[in-house]
């Protein structure tokens, strides 16, 4: 006989969902309880509420991003999930900083498909003042001048306000810099730089007026508490776009034999992030196809409002046409005239005042 549905769980999920829908927030204990839900009936309850929250704050809009691997492989850092680290033997391609042509080609393709942004991603520790910063700024300025797509970048650690200001002056609008995991779990996947380096970089970027794209990777061996603390830290730093990557274990990396997360655990995690970050763009990025397979379209039911399309840095994705068809079939609209993130502004939202005060984890 099927186990009886736990009415208490049903009611508690509904109460938390209704609070978020009304403009309130949930605290760490409440969020942890959601992350620990196990029964599929409870998880599907949670997804239904996450879907309502997404619809309340995002309507049927979906934010699409794509990336260009602007400098590949040979990275000095030892991130255990990454095929591009020089510490791991992965056979991943290596090349120096990209010429202007492939960047403009990526902008054309993004424009054709209604993709909001193209991000230049470089496999290196970070960016300092000097000729490389000049070259990076030239590429960003080219993208900005073309008017075809929003120029974004993910260029690693920044150690000075001047660098962040130069990027802003070149036309950069949004910078990708993941916290990757909780502060507690971070040293278990990277020891060549720190969580604090990443938080400091985000501080310079915010001060320069650049929007923040910051999320992490799940499936590295972290606990549900780590995932919850990552989401709370992202709430605390005010990330505008929150990419959730799902580990795709790459042969040659220390995480090559990590067990894959069950798809329902992934969908539940996305839903918990939506409960904690109701107005933010929750973007499903690397590892989507390989981990979710036929359940990919359920990411939106789970509360996702953004999608990384096209191929990832070192792995393949399903085609952009397939993704666009998936969105159309779901009644979702990827065409933003221009996404200036004003819908994330609480004052502009018109919702009821907060019903509860967030208990924030300092980043
Ligand atoms: S994740 Fe980034 S910083 Fe870490 S090894 Fe890969 S390219 Fe380098």
Image (cartoon, rainbow, N blue to C red):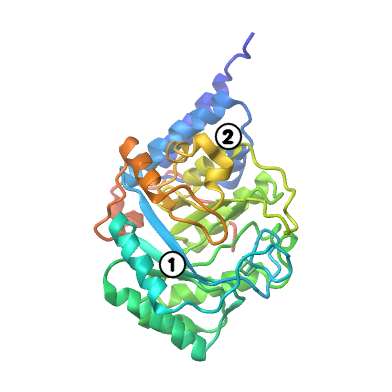
Q: Residues within 10 Å of mark 2 (few under 14, many from 20)?
A: some
Image x and y of residue 46, in percent: 50, 33
- Compared across the picture, whether 275 is left or right of 221 comes to left
Q: Give the side of residue 32 with respect to residue 354, left or right.
A: right
Q: Which residue is mark 1?
A: 119
Q: Is residue 359 above or below residue 295?
A: below
Secondary structure at numbered mark 2: helix
Q: Is residue 329 visible?
A: yes
In the current view of this chain or complex, which residue is farthest to the left? Answer: 337
Q: Are marks 1 and 2 in contact (CB under 8 Å)?
A: no
Q: Report which quarter residue 336 is drawn in.
A: bottom left
Whether residue 360 is visible: no
The kind of secondary structure element at disc 1 is: strand
Q: Residue drawn 50% across and 91% down?
A: 131
Residue 76 higher or lower than 341, as above or below: below
* Precedes in sequence: disc 1 or disc 2: 1
| Residue 264: image tag | 2
């Amino acid at each position: 006989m099927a186990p009886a549905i736990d009415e208490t769980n049903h009611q508690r999920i509904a109460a938390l969902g209704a609070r978020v829908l009304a403009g309130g927030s949930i605290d760490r204990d409440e969020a942890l309880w959601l992350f620990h839900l196990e029964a599929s009936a409870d998880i599907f309850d949670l997804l239904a509420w996450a879907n309502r929250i997404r619809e309340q704050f995002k309507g049927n809009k979906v934010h699409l991003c794509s990336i260009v691997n602007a400098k590949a492989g040979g990275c000095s850092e030892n991130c255990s999930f990454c095929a591009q680290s020089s510490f791991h033997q992965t056979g991943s391609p290596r090349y120096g900083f990209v010429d202007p042509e492939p960047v403009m080609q990526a902008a054309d393709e993004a424009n054709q498909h209604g993709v909001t942004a193209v991000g230049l991603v470089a496999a290196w520790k970070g960016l300092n003042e000097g000729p490389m910063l000049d070259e990076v700024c030239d590429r960003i300025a080219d993208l900005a001048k073309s008017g075809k797509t929003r120029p974004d970048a993910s260029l690693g650690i920044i150690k000075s306000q001047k660098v962040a200001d130069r990027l802003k002056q070149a036309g950069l609008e949004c910078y990708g810099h993941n916290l990757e995991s909780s502060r507690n779990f971070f040293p278990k996947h990277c020891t060549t730089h720190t969580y604090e380096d990443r938080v400091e970089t985000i501080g310079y970027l915010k001060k320069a007026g650049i929007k923040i794209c910051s999320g992490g990777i799940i499936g590295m061996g972290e606990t549900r508490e780590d995932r919850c603390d990552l989401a709370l830290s992202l709430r605390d730093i005010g990330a505008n776009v929150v990419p959730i990557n799902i580990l795709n274990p790459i042969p040659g990396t220390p995480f090559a034999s990590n067990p894959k997360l069950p798809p329902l655990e992934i969908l539940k995690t996305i839903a918990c992030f939506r409960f904690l970050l109701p107005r933010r763009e929750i973007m499903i990025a690397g590892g989507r196809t390989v981990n979710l397979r036929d359940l990919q379209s359920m990411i939106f039911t789970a509360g996702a409002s953004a999608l990384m399309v096209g191929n990832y840095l070192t792995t393949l994705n399903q085609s952009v046409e397939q993704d666009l068809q998936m969105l159309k079939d779901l009644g979702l609209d990827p065409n933003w005239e221009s996404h200036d993130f004003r819908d994330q502004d609480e004052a502009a939202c018109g919702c009821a005042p907060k019903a509860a005060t967030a208990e924030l984890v300092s980043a």
